Every structure is written in structure tokens, then in C-alpha cells.
Image (cartoon, rainbow, N blue to C red):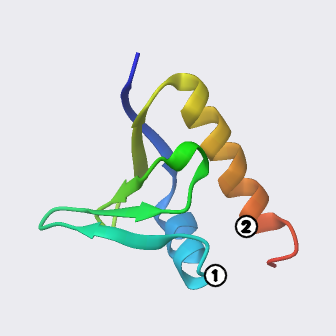
Amino acid sequence: MKKNQNVASAAEMRELLKLDIIQPFNVGPNWTSYAGAPFGCHIRWNSEGFGFILGSDYEAGVIEDWVQFELHTGNE
């Protein structure tokens, strides 16, 4: 079942952007969606709280792991 799932903290989202791992895809008035995550998922973020996806528990787990991998493998 697809539902809103938190996948990255605000600090992690800022770092993903700084490293150019994710890119703005659709800028909206309340949040922006960012492309670059596995499964073609877009991470939505309001630049303050958690980055989230609309997806399954499995997709959220894979993307959470991907965020950690991207931030801690050769990008320190």
C-alpha cells in the first residue's frame, strides 16, 4: 500500500542537494519534489522537515538505505 513515508531528515536532504545527488523536479508552493532516488521516486520536501515519498514500506526502506549509502560512501 502506498502512503507518505519519511526517507530523509532535513540535514540529509540539504546534503543530497549540496552534493548534487538529487535535483529539483517540480517546484510547488508548499514543497518541491526532487528527482534522483531509486525506482524513479521523487522525494518531496518543504526545506524544513523530513523528505518523504509516496510509496510502499519496501520502497521507503530502499530509499532510506540509498540516502545513507550516498551520504556515507566516498562523499564525506
Where is mark 1, residue-wise? 19
Observer able to see residue 47: no
Picture layout, residue 7 above or below residue 58: below
Observer able to see residue 29: yes
Q: Looking at this view, is 42 or 13 the one in front?
A: 42
Question: Looking at numbered disc 2 in the image, what kind of residue is underneath it?
Answer: Leu
Q: Residues within 10 Å of mark 1 (few under 14, many from 20)?
A: few
Q: Looking at this view, is 44 or 72 the one in front?
A: 44
The quarter of the picture where residue 63 lies is: top right
Tag 1 secondary structure: loop
The quarter of the picture where residue 59 lies is: top right
Q: Mark 2 or mark 1: which comes first in sequence?
A: 1
The answer to whether the residues at label 2 and label 1 have Cβ atoms under 8 Å apart is yes
Res 71 label: 2
Q: Residues within 10 Å of mark 2 (few under 14, many from 20)?
A: some
Q: CA distance from mark 2 to mark 1?
A: 9 Å
Q: Residue furthest top?
A: 1
Name the residue located 57 percent from the left edge and 65 percent from the top edge.
12
Question: Looking at numbered disc 1 in the image, what kind of residue is underneath it?
Answer: Leu
How many discs appear? Answer: 2
Q: Residue furthest front?
A: 40
Name the residue located 24 percent from the left edge and 62 percent from the top edge.
31
Q: Looking at this view, is 7 or 27 the one in front?
A: 27
Name the residue located 48 percent from the left edge and 25 percent from the top edge.
56
Picture layout, residue 14 above or below residue 39: below
Name the residue located 66 percent from the left edge and 56 percent from the top edge.
67
Q: Looking at this view, is 41 or 68 the one in front?
A: 41
Query: How far across and down, in percent of the image, does residue 40 sit?
Result: 51, 49
Picture layout, residue 3 above or below residue 72: above
* Image quadrant in which the N terminus is located: top left
